[in-house]
Amino acid sequence: MLDSVAKAFFHLIAQSRILKTLASRYGMRKPTSFARRFIAGETITEAIEAARAVEARGMTITLDLLGESVTNLDEADAATRAYQTVIEAIIASGIGRNLSLKLTQLGLDVDKASAIDNLRKILERADPAGFFVRIDMESSAYTDVTLEIVETLWHHGYRQIGVVLQSALYRTEERDLARVNALGARIRLVKGAYKEPRHVAHPRKADADAAYTRVMKTLITEGHYPAIATHDPRMIELAREWARERGVPPDRFEFQMLYGVRRDLQAMLVKAGYRVRVYIPFGREWFPYFMRRLGERPANVMFVIRGILGESG
Ligand SMILES: Cc1cc2nc3c(=O)[nH]c(=O)nc-3n(C[C@H](O)[C@H](O)[C@H](O)COP(=O)(O)OP(=O)(O)OC[C@H]3O[C@@H](n4cnc5c(N)ncnc54)[C@H](O)[C@@H]3O)c2cc1C
């Protein structure tokens, strides 16, 4: 209950211009600024530096150039070009070739065909260079169209792409899990970061967690190199147990966590011999991503308030 109230509250204040201005002014200003706990920086250079540090700790990475919900095709083109530049920088740097991106960043809200075109432009460079590109999942309004686009590109021969399914949505268990598994694409399983209506998603967190466990089990035994993306120690323990019991070796799946969240768990898993990928977001458009992280854990708010008071004083 508290969780859905927190999500709704942060969804609401994420629209606040004053807050956005304040956060943007202070959030990234110094190396110690509060937003840097979750965001690697505003530039690709900072992201690559963060990625190198993560890789040095025995983990792999995926880079997300932050941005979403663009409202015109110029912005979508700019995001596409920015991703192309990021690809070149990643190649030059020698870090892992793995990207995560959002279709509304490529213009999905403006024109579906243009968004597909933009994604194709990114894949045309990324695919031959051996990149894996994960299409993040946004709110349930985009689930259908996101899966359709992934399927279309898959059938056009782009096999180094994957999707995300959210255990909170009823449709994940009802149909999407089987649909994507049948396609053969890799799935990243998450609980779901968006505020959803009750007819679409489990309103109780306990039910979304139970669904997570069920889907995770199917993915570990029947998925295609699934990503178990969670910071929930209970889910992680269940996944390890299930894989052990079913004789699925640790190189057949990976755990994924967000940059700056539960670094202790990340290290513990690496030490225990599991694969861990860290999702590293960076870029100037960090505010909505940042607000979702606060909504997941209201305790983070005190940390931000202390940061703002400390920096503005
Ligand atoms: C790699 C990765 C990619 C993701 N991609 C997507 C996506 O494409 N679409 C989507 O809807 N969602 C995505 N998410 C977010 C996801 O849906 C959840 O909102 C988020 O992971 C929190 O859920 P949880 O599984 O960690 O469990 P929870 O039950 O929310 O949290 C379990 C524990 O993890 C820790 N924790 C969780 N979140 C935080 C935080 N923000 N700050 C500090 N501690 C925290 C706390 O200790 C908490 O008790 C992604 C998550 C990960 C890890």
Image (spheres, rainbow, N blue to C red):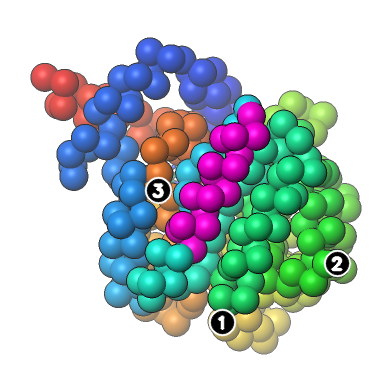
Q: Which residue is mark 1?
A: 250
Q: Are marks 2 and 1 in contact (CB under 8 Å)?
A: no
The answer to whether the beta carbon of the residue marked 2 is less than 8 Å from any atom of ligand 1 is no
Q: Residue at x 64, y 29 (%)?
A: 72
The answer to whether the beta carbon of the residue marked 1 is less than 8 Å from any atom of ligand 1 is no
Q: Judging from the image, what secondary structure is the residue with disc 2 in?
A: helix
Which label belongs to residue 118? Answer: none
Q: Amino acid at mark 1?
A: Pro
Front residue of this view, candidates 121 and 214: 121
Tally the marks.
3
Could you tell me residue 66's position as x and y percent? Answer: 48, 44
Dot 2 or dot 3: first in sequence order is: 2
Q: Which residue is mark 3?
A: 282
Front residue of this view, candidates 243 and 14: 14
Q: For label 1, count other residues whose C-alpha is less than 10 Å away and answer few (under 14), some (14-19) or many (20+).
A: some
In this picture, which residue range is highlighted in magenta? 72-87
Separation of marks 3 and 1 at Cα, in angstroms: 29 Å
Could you tell me residue 180's position as x and y percent? Answer: 81, 62
Secondary structure predominantly adopted by residues drawn in magenta? helix
Q: Is residue 103 visible?
A: yes
Above or below, comparing residue 165 to residue 208 in the picture: below
Could you tell me residue 77's position as x and y percent? Answer: 60, 42
Q: Which residue is mark 2?
A: 155
Residue 171 belongs to the span the image colors magenta = no
* Mark closer to the observer (2, 1): 2
Residue at the far left in the pictured view: 313
Dot 3 or dot 1: first in sequence order is: 1
